[in-house]
């Protein structure tokens, strides 16, 4: 009897091969042939699932986003119930910083994707949902903190969330680039959060 193929699992497996290449050496020069070899499949089979490299890159980004979302959810669950908004904001931003092997891998892989977008901007002509969704989530937590009287009343939750996420991404790049270590990045993040909450 022929073995039943799990097509979703095969797509994830191929996308994971691309993400590994992205983390290790970037995406600009990764060919379909190289991804197929890394996934242990033929180029023809890879193209059955992903017709073009762009299609593969965007699918892989979706899987990467789902992985980061799972990391956020895990960190927030660890806070207990119900968590305080400040703790949720801190845990979420800390999950983005490259402070452990998993987050270093995620940050390096996202950096590879953004580097590719610099030379191939058509890949995100409609934007990417993950940063926008994360900003909205953080803004919601900041609003909840304001309503609870534990965040400064005058701050703009949307602008503050965008700034916090941009700062955290910049801190992540500075850790990967060797400008500061993870502990120093966490110290910078805590300092800025201390200025928002009362």
Image (cartoon, helix red, strand yellow):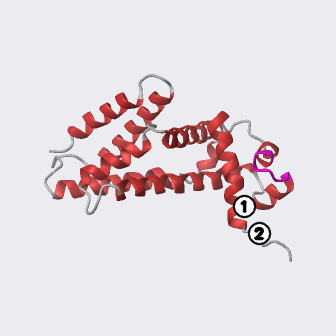
Q: Residue furthest front?
A: 1
Quadrant holding the C terminus:
top left
Q: Is residue 81 left or right of residue 121?
A: left
The x, y position of residue 125, in whole percent, is 59, 50
Q: Residue at x 25, y 50 (%)?
A: 86
Disc 1: which residue? 10
Q: Secondary structure at mark 2?
A: loop
Q: Residue at x 76, y 45 (%)?
A: 38
Residue 60 appears left or right of 66: right
Establish if 166 lies above or below 141. Answer: above
Structural distance between the alpha carbons of marks 2 and 1: 8 Å
Residue 122, given in percent of the width and then of the height, sits at: 64, 47
Q: Is residue 129 left or right of residue 43?
A: left
What label sits on residue 101 in the rendered view? none
- Label 1 crowd (10 A; few <14 / some 14-19 / many >=20): some
Residue 9 colored magenta? no
Label 2 neighbourhood size at 10 Å, few (<14), some (14-19), many (20+)?
A: few
Q: Quadrant of the N terminus?
A: bottom right
Name the one closer to the observer, 35 or 161: 35
Residue 31, compared with residue 62, is above or below; it is above
Where is residue 134 shown, x and y percent of the image? 41, 53
In contact (CB < 8 Å): disc 2 and disc 1: yes
Residues shaded magenta: 37-43
> Which numbered disc flags the more N-terminal residue, 2 or 1?
2
Q: Is residue 8 visible?
A: yes
| Residue nearer the viewer, 186 or 150 | 186
Residue that carries the numbered disc 2 in the rendered image: 5
Q: Is residue 55 visible?
A: no
Q: Residue at x 79, y 46 (%)?
A: 32
């Amino acid at each position: 009897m022929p073995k039943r193929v799990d097509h979703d699992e095969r797509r994830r497996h191929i996308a994971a091969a691309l993400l590994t290449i992205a983390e290790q050496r970037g995406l600009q020069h990764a060919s379909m042939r190289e991804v197929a070899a890394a996934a242990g499949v033929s180029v023809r089979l890879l193209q059955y699932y992903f017709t073009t490299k762009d299609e593969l890159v965007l699918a892989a980004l979706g899987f990467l986003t789902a992985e980061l979302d799972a990391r956020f959810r895990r960190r927030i669950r660890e806070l207990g119930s119900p968590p305080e908004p400040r703790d949720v904001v801190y845990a979420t931003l800390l999950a983005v910083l490259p402070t452990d092997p998993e987050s270093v891998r995620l940050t390096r892989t996202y950096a590879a994707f953004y580097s590719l977008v610099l030379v191939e901007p058509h890949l995100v002509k409609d934007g990417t949902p993950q940063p926008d969704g994360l900003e909205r989530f953080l803004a919601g937590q900041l609003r909840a903190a304001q309503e609870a009287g534990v965040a400064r009343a005058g701050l703009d939750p949307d602008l503050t969330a965008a700034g916090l996420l941009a700062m955290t991404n910049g801190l992540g790049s500075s850790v990967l680039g060797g400008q500061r270590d993870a502990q120093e990045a966490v110290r910078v993040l805590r300092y800025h959060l201390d200025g928002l909450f009362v």
